[in-house]
Image (cartoon, rainbow, N blue to C red):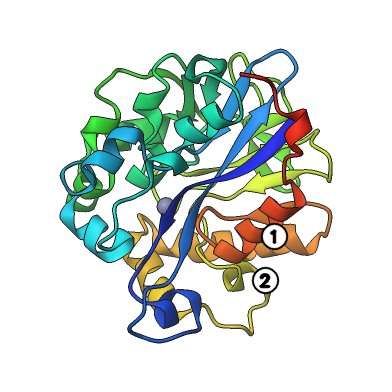
Amino acid sequence: MRVHHLSCLTFCPLSARLVNGRGSLFERGRMEAHCLLIETERHGLVLVDTGIGVDDCADPKGRLGGLFTRVLIGTSTPSVAQTALKQIEALGFRASDVRHIVPTHLDLDHAGGLPDFPHATVHVMAAEKDAALLRRTMPEKSRYRPVHFAHGPKWSTYEAKGERWRGFEAVRALEGLPPEIFLIPLAGHSRGHACVGVEGASGGPLVHCGDAYFHRAAIDDARAPMPAGLRVFEQRLAFDRSRVAENHARLRALREGGDVRVFCAHDPEEYDALRTAAEVAPELRRAG
Ligand SMILES: [Zn+2]
């Protein structure tokens, strides 16, 4: 099993000081959409989170909403070359090689790429699929975008069944996937948010935490405060704020255990560290 760390959107949020904890209040900051591309032995390519899609880059305001575009992306057009589809093609694969997608949740910046892989099975917690398709509240109407699901994804949905992994619940029997790729249900940020665990890659287990936290300070060291803007942003977006705080504490304990590489979707320093460690040697890339 080989794991690539891809950023499928670089956000330029307002403002560097409030989001990254350094720089000016008035310059834009940086966040990434950290996705995993997993090459499996017998199950094709597996994508964990998708970032935004090719069509979103052409019409960010129309497809993602004016507020999201203004606050988080800024004035420059998102790069099509950075979408999961284009990066996967640049590695020598085709869209149809992606047989499975395991999104941590279905917010627009995690599920926007689903239409680029219409043949893939999408594995999510049942509560998250319902939240995204039913859009019962005003915040859910803006965080989930129907254009990302209009192609009719092949859903495979799950309930937590009492399996355990390192003190967390786990769902290991993902249809058509090896047990090394599993969901860790962790609702709070959204109704059916889950982290995604990956075992069997070199360097030890990985846990992609999606938006269970937004900045490494949330789970690294309780004494280092999270940048103020991100703290407010996280609270505003949370479906259940008390569970978000509880999830931070549990993930802090997991990270302190030492052998699991725990990272979230948007922290640029976590992304840079893992990306560097996993940089792909060109001679290992499959010919197109
Ligand atoms: Zn997000």
Vertical order, 248 against 164 (above or below):
below
Say if mark 2 contacts mark 1, CB within 8 Å: no
- Picture quarter with the C terminus: top right
| Residue 62 visible to an observer of this rendering | yes
Vertical order, 267 against 85 (above or below):
below
Disc 2 residue: CB within 8 Å of ligand 1: no
Q: Give the distance between the C-alpha atoms of the residues marked 2 and 1, in whole angstroms.
A: 15 Å
Which residue in the structure is indicated by mark 2? 220
Q: Reading the chain from its start, which is encountered first: label 2 or label 1?
A: 2
- Picture quarter with the N terminus: top right
Which residue in the structure is indicated by mark 1? 273
Classify residue 72 as left or right of residue 166. Answer: left
Q: Quadrant of residue 91?
A: top right
Instruction: Give the residue at x 72% y 46%.
Output: 279
Instruction: Give the residue at x 35% y 54%.
Output: 239
The x, y position of residue 69, in whole percent, is 25, 56
**What's the amino acid at mark 2?**
Asp
Q: Residues within 10 Å of mark 1 (few under 14, many from 20)?
A: few
Quick one: 15 or 247, which is closer to the camera? 15
Instruction: Give the residue at x 25% y 57%.
Output: 68
Name the element at disc 1.
helix
**What's the amino acid at mark 1?**
Ala
